[in-house]
Amino acid sequence: MGGGTFILAINAALRKGIRKIVGWQVSVSVSLSLDKSLRKINSSLMECPADESLALANFTKLPPSHQMYYSKWIEEAKTTSTLTNRIAKAVNALSKNMDVGATI
């Protein structure tokens, strides 16, 4: 809107929480900060590609954001079976130089 003012859509739960009524104009201040903490790649993911040199080489070429996407996807597995399948799928895809989207 200019002058550092922006329109921000909020979901129904938040609107209900602040008891917003139709037509109200609500102002909020938002503060952002950079998260400088180092994120670690899932250790199970890193152990498997070590056996597959091509997969490891392709993994290290990926941007850090894509590496983290693989790592988070694997960490979100709720069962050992799912964890194993995801690691195998990731290593197979990395061996074939497939991108993250094609893998998942």
Image (tube, rainbow, N blue to C red):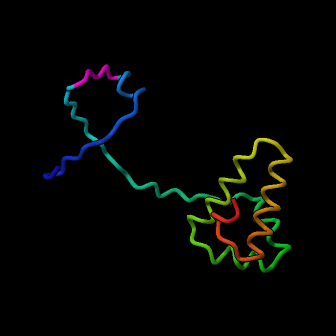
Direction left: furthest residue: 3
Q: Residue at x 65, y 70 (%)?
A: 99
Q: Residue at x 69, y 46 (%)?
A: 76
Locate residue 14 relative to residue 5 in the image: left or right. right
Report the predominant secondary structure element of the magenta stretch.
loop
Between 62 and 11, the one nearer to me in the picture: 11
Q: Residue at x 82, y 66 (%)?
A: 48
The magenta-colored residue range is 18-22
Locate residue 7 relative to residue 94 in the image: left or right. left
Tell me where residue 54 sits by quadrant: bottom right
Locate residue 10 relative to residue 68 in the image: left or right. left
Query: x and y percent of residue 41 in the render?
Result: 67, 60
Q: Quadrant of the C terminus?
A: bottom right
Query: x and y percent of residue 101 in the render?
Result: 63, 63
84 falls in the magenta region: no
Query: x and y percent of residue 64 in the render?
Result: 57, 68
Tell me where residue 31 sits by quadrant: top left
Q: Residue at x 57, y 71 (%)?
A: 63
19 falls in the magenta region: yes
Query: x and y percent of residue 88 in the render?
Result: 83, 62
